[in-house]
Image: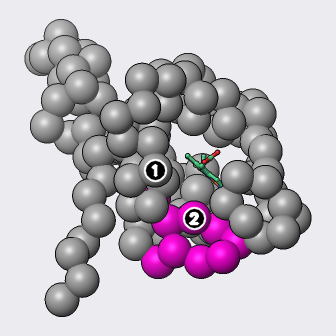
Amino acid sequence: MFRSVLFCLCLSPLGLFAQTDATALAKEKACLGCHSIDQHTMSVPSYQKIAEKYRGDPTAVEYLSEKIRNGGKGVWGGGGRSLMPAFLNLSQSEIRLLVDWILSMKETPAQ
Ligand code: HEC
């Protein structure tokens, strides 16, 4: 019993629950306090726009992981004043989960 619980815990970030885990983490770490999935603004990019911008870029995972860890500004307008805060308290695997989640987003087609 104990063993199967451990087994589930280990697999869940890679498995079926990846989506939910990433969403929960993004909520818990306040990412979704600033970012919206699909509401893009001048000062804070939506995750769908970020995915669109970096899709197909082979350096995207490394670059975005770095940016989440150390924060930064000046890429998305906001007059260079909108700041992405640094998240030094996130583990490498948490950051990876968030980056993969963001990059997997597709823009909802305009209706
Ligand atoms: C205080 C508001 C705020 C919070 C909280 C926040 N962000 Fe950001 N984020 C921003 C802003 C503003 C930018 C645009 C920065 C720029 O123009 O370079 C940004 C940019 C980004 C980018 C794109 C970087 C680029 O260079 O294109 C990613 C990816 C990102 N954030 C992920 C996250 C994740 C993941 C979290 C949670 C761990 C998070 N953000 C939390 C405000 C925030």
> Nearer the N terminus, badge 2 or badge 1?
2
In the figure, 97 relative to 48: above or below? above
**Which dot, 2 or 1, sits closer to the camera?**
1
Q: Position of residue 105 (x, y in %)?
A: 30, 53
> Label 2 CB, ligand 1: below 8 Å?
yes
Q: Give the residue at x 67% y 60%.
A: 76
Q: Which residues are magenta?
A: 39-47
- The quarter in which the N terminus is drawn is top left
In the image, which disc is placed on residue 53?
Answer: 1
Residues at marks 2 and 1, CA–CA distance in whole angstroms:
10 Å
Looking at the rendered structure, the kind of residue marked 1 is Lys
In the figure, 28 relative to 64: above or below? below
In the image, which disc is placed on residue 10?
Answer: none
| SS for callout 1 | helix
Q: Which residue is mark 2?
A: 45
> Looking at the image, can residue 61 be seen?
no
Classify residue 20 as left or right of residue 68: left
Assess whether residue 20 is covered by the magenta stretch: no
Q: Nearer the viewer, residue 10 or 42?
A: 42
Q: Are marks 2 and 1 in contact (CB under 8 Å)?
A: yes
Figure colour scheme? one colour
- The quarter in which the C terminus is drawn is bottom left
Q: Give the residue at x 84% y 69%.
A: 79
